[in-house]
Image (cartoon, rainbow, N blue to C red):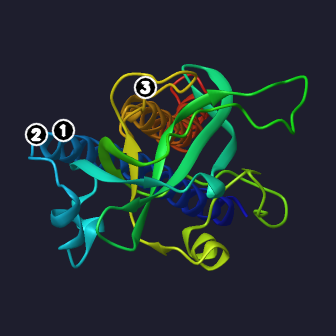
Amino acid sequence: MSRARFLVVTVATALTMAATASLGLWQLDRARQKTALQAAILSRAELPAWDNAALLAQTDPSAGLYRPVRLRGQWIARHNVFLDNRQMDGRVGFFLVTPLRLSGSERVVLVQRGWVPRDFHDRARVPDVDTPAGEVTVQGRLAPPPGRLYQFGEAGTGAIRQNIDPAAYRLETGLALLDPSVQQTGDDEGPLRRQWPLPAVDVSKHHGYAFQWFALCTLVAGLYLWFQIIQPRRQRARLHGPDAR
């Protein structure tokens, strides 16, 4: 029974150490991936901005994510979407997303125009944000579609939504949407704030998680050595020592 218990504890310890060490290495790999992504973002930010022609000439515009763009077009204000429960600078409000029809084309790109505060007294009230008519010039960077938050049920089709699904939005509006979106940059505009965070700013979080997993792995190894090897040997030494009777 003692030998069987020793084998069971040994196998369980080995599996636990392998799992915790693997999780620690995975967190370090996630940190490396985000660091590489941030380096790519900073590198692409130095490239010349794409205009309408350059963007439309791309067979895969998503390959240029985080590259600067300077686009001309017209806002389609009737399809404004306010994404709920979005944060900027620690405050909760909306991300305003407006489709922009590119000049000289029927193609449309979703523009994340900025963050705007919400009316907490009337949660169904749409913020008052000016959307100029006529041709406008939008400066920003190509970005993935707005991040998704957890939601109950369907995304909905109103002006205020939790998420926006580009494929469903394309069917809903009939617009010829490009795959990437644009995060508008530049100075704040009225109530709109544009302090967009970079996606790799939380690398230290992964380092912290990795430390915790490696620490747990070390603790398991230490407990195993103490209770399964060191302590039993000390007990046997006391039983069979020169003073044992």
Label 3: state its secondary structure: loop
Identify residue for label 1: 42
Badge 2 marks a residue whose secondary structure is loop
Q: In the displayed image of the protein, which residue is found farthest to the right?
A: 121
Q: Amino acid at mark 1?
A: Leu
Quarter holding the C terminus is top right
Residue 245 visible? The answer is no
Given contact means CB atoms under 8 Å apart, are the residues at marks 1 and 3 in contact? Answer: no
What residue is at 17 percent from the left and 73 percent from the top? 57
Three-letter amino acid code of the residue under disc 3: Gln
Disc number placed over residue 29 in the picture, else none: none
Secondary structure state at the residue bearing disc 1:
helix
Residue at mark 1 to residue at mark 3: CA–CA distance: 16 Å
Residue under label 3: 195
Q: Is residue 9 visible?
A: yes
Write the residue at 59% across / 42% down.
96
* Above-or-below relation of 18 to 204: below
Who's the residue at 18% across and 47% down the image?
40
User: What is the quadrant of residue 139 in the picture?
Assistant: top left
Instruction: Name the spot of residue 71 as percent of width and height, x first.
Output: 28, 51
Distance, label 1 to label 2, CA atoms, is 7 Å
Residue 11 on image: x %, y %: 56, 63
Q: Bin the neighbour count of mark 3 within 10 Å (Cα to Cα): few under 14, some 14-19, many 20 and up.
A: some
Tell me the mark number nearer the camera, choosing from 1 and 3.
3
Location of the N terminus by quadrant is bottom right
Do callouts 1 and 2 mark residues in contact (Cβ within 8 Å)? Answer: yes
The residue under label 2 is which amino acid type?
Answer: Glu
Query: Which numbered tag is attached to residue 46?
Result: 2
Which of these two is toward me, 223 or 46?
Answer: 46
Mark closer to the chain start, 1 or 3 = 1
Left-right relation of 101 to 193: left
Q: Earlier in the sequence, mark 3 or mark 2?
A: 2
